[in-house]
Amino acid sequence: MTTAFVILHHKTLDVSLSCLDNLLKVAPDSPIVVVDNGSNDGSGEELRRRFSDYKNVVIIINDQNLGFAKGNNVGYKYVKDNFDVDCVVVMNNDVIITQPNFAEIIASYMLENHLYVCGPDIITPEGRHQNPLQREPFSTFRIIKWMLMDCIRLIMLTLHLFEKKILATYTSVSNSYQRQDIDLNGITDCVLHGSCVAYSSDYLSKEDFAFVPVTFLYAEEMILADYCKRKNYRTGVCPTATITHLGGKTIMNGALPREKQIFKTRQVVRSLWQMLKLRFFCK
């Protein structure tokens, strides 16, 4: 079974180099497509120069930052149009794969369990597990509540009201999604963590995108879970395929915590609004 990899790159050259170096060790012959998502700092050109001798590595340079979903979709569509593969793994550049037979494990698991979309066991450097992001999609009521609360927090952050308390709340919520131990066996139809998602040949044959292209950043996993449920695409987590997710390497490096949170909250609100539109108006 042949697996291709799509890696989204934005400015963090050292992170992407580490990701590629590890990936080429464990999957030296697999097609690898790197999408420079509008870095405009020369890092995409440097990647192209460094890997010019690798016939299986393709560097695509976008003129502008298309966001997470559309940026990844550029690489996914390139793979679909140019390679005959059984599986496509779409991953962040801050993901490290060292498992020698990772591609075989996750591709075989999807085939055996009739999955369209699958995620590995994602482990942080601290040993916490990130998959599944959620056991099941949030209810519409909970999404509306979340969006309204974030709107209030965004106004408060903009006006410098209760900054420390709000930032501490965000940190606490973020950590709650990470677990020390979890039994991944038999987990299906869940919300997968977006840092590394595998798509089967069945999905490839039917869809021209990896992530539903309606957002710039955040909630892509939740929207994908909704889409798969609507299309009757089975999803799951492969407990024997493992990766390390460094995390926090790609979003507004160098910005102050308040600036980062304002940016993130604004994008989350926009993404949740798109998610609600899809739930109400798409069949």
Image (tube, helix red, strand yellow):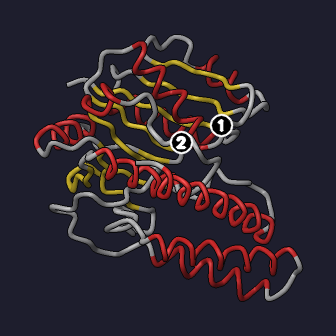
| SS at mark 2 in the image | loop
Residue 173 location, x and y as percent? 54, 79
State the residue lying farthest toward the right: 159
- Depth check: 54 or 138 in front? 138
Q: Is residue 241 above or below residue 159?
A: above
Q: Residue at point 26% right, 41% down?
A: 116
260 lies left or right of 97: right
Callout 2: 10 Å neighbours few (<14), some, many (20+)? many
Q: Which mark is residue 143?
A: none
Q: Position of residue 282 (x, y in %)?
A: 46, 48
Q: Position of residue 172 (x, y in %)?
A: 56, 82
Q: Quadrant of residue 62?
A: top right
| Lateral position of residue 142 relative to residue 190, left or right | right
Q: Amino acid at mark 2?
A: Asn
Sequence-wise, the earlier of marks 1 and 2 is 1
* Nearer the camera: disc 1 or disc 2: 2
User: At 32% across and 33% down in the image, what residue appears?
Assistant: 26
Q: Is residue 86 left or right of residue 146?
A: left
Numbered disc 1: secondary structure:
helix
Crowding at mark 1 (Cα within 10 Å: few <14, some 14-19, many 20+): some
Q: Amino acid at mark 1?
A: Leu
Image coordinates for residue 88, horizontal then vertical, percent: 35, 31
| Residue pointed to by mark 1 | 13
Residue pushed farthest left? 112
Using the numbered discs, state the Cα–Cα distance from disc 1 to disc 2 in whole angstroms: 9 Å
Of 143 and 255, nearer the camera is 143
Residue nearer the viewer, 195 or 43: 195
Residue identifier under label 2: 93
In the image shown, does 223 or 109 lie closer to the viewer? 223
